């Protein structure tokens, strides 16, 4: 397992399809934690916590039933501030539905916040 974001998004999607109320993602990473924080701020997941098990750790996440689809974007394409609309067409179902999670020089954020700040970055994940 080399891509913790792809593993985490797949686990979230599988548990959402089975109508679970919570799930555990392992292994954990700082980048995955930041992606989960962006999803939480946009209302796709509830509270989550890091559990230190002495190895790589894991995340315990409350699911709200609001995710229709989510996934990691591989390879992590570079995107400029004025190119977000083309990537929205590729990964999201409609113009104002869903988020793209972007790693910018100012931190991990959604594509909407990156557009407002006029910064580009690398695409990490999507959710709608």
Image (cartoon, rainbow, N blue to C red):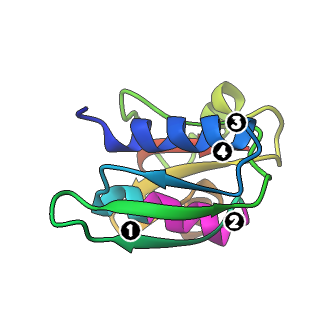
Magenta segment includes 37: yes
Q: Nearer the viewer, residue 5 or 105?
A: 5
Q: Position of residue 100 (x, y in %)?
A: 59, 47
The mark lying in front, picked from 1 and 3, is 3
Instruction: For mark 4, give the secondary structure.
Output: strand
Residue 80 image position (x, y, % from top left):
46, 45
1 or 3: tag closer to the N-terminus: 3
**Magenta residues (range):** 34-43
Residue for badge 3: 69
Q: Earlier in the sequence, mark 3 or mark 2?
A: 2
Q: Residue at x 56, y 40 (%)?
A: 83
Element marked by disc 2: loop
Task: Judge the density around disc 1: few (<14), some (14-19), many (≥20) Cα neighbours within 10 Å.
Answer: few
Give the spatial CA distance, label 4 vs label 1: 18 Å
Q: Are marks 2 and 4 in contact (CB under 8 Å)?
A: yes
What is the x, y in percent for residue 104?
Answer: 39, 59
Lower position in the chain sequence, tag 2 or tag 4:
2
Disc 4 target residue: 127
The residue depicted at 64 percent of the width and 71 percent of the height is: 41
Q: Nearer the viewer, mark 1 or mark 2?
A: 2
């Amino acid at each position: 397992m080399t891509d913790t974001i792809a593993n985490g998004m797949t686990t979230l999607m599988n548990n959402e399809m089975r109508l679970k109320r919570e799930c555990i993602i392992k292994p954990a990473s700082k980048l995955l934690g930041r992606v989960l924080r962006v999803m939480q701020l946009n209302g796709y997941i509830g509270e989550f916590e890091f559990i230190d098990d002495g190895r790589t750790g894991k995340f315990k996440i409350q699911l709200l039933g609001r995710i229709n689809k989510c996934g990691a974007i591989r390879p992590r394409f570079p995107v400029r501030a004025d190119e977000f609309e083309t990537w929205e067409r590729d990964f999201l179902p409609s113009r104002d539905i869903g988020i793209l999670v972007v790693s910018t020089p100012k931190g991990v954020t959604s594509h909407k916040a990156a557009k407002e700040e006029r910064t580009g970055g690398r695409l990490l994940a999507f959710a709608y």
